[in-house]
Image: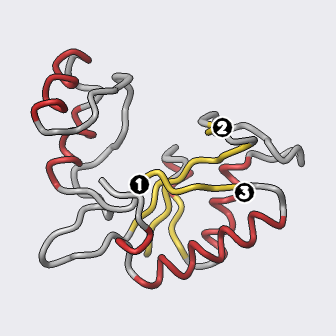
Amino acid sequence: MSRDINQCVPELQEKWQEIVRLTAEIGIEPVIVCTSRTQLEQVIFWLNDKLPVDEIKRIRLILGMPPETSGKKITRTLNSKHIVTEKQPLSRAIDFAIKKNGKYIWNVEADGNVDGKSDYRQVGAIAEELGLNCLDEINDFGHIEVK
């Protein structure tokens, strides 16, 4: 799994920089938590809420992944635009979190810039204005992708 914006298609790299610029103007700091991943990582993330936590930790250790897991849903699909392959060497998706005062804010309803709106929803709306898909409508907050 990578957090490197250079692992994304150029269109997403450019639009992410614009998202960062526009959200800074309204006091929101989105940060990348995932750009690309392998098919195997995707499978492990998909299994995260389907197997006992101890089993997921064991599998993650065997695969050289950090063992931390909450047992909560990470992804809804095995067919992610994050997955990179020989045929598709660059990611077409970004997962992001909101950072405020040096801390990650995982509550999707949080209003860190105190304007009466969810910061996650505001980032998603900006992404959509720039022509990206934001998956808020299926409660996949913090995920944007190229159409």
Select label 1 or label 2 by which is in front: 2
- According to the image, label 2 marks what residue? 103
Q: Nearer the viewer, residue 72 or 99?
A: 99
Q: Amino acid at mark 3?
A: Gln
Label 3: element kind: helix
Quadrant position of residue 59: top left
Number of residue marks: 3
Quadrant position of residue 130: bottom right
3 or 1: tag closer to the N-terminus:
1
Q: Nearer the viewer, residue 62 or 113?
A: 62
Q: Residue furthest right?
A: 115
Select label 2 or label 3 by which is in front: 2
- According to the image, label 3 marks what residue? 122
- According to the image, label 1 marks what residue? 34
Select label 3 or label 1 by which is in front: 1
Verify CB contact (< 8 Å) between mark 1 and mark 2. no
- How far, Cα to Cα, is label 2 from label 3? 19 Å
Q: Amino acid at mark 1?
A: Cys
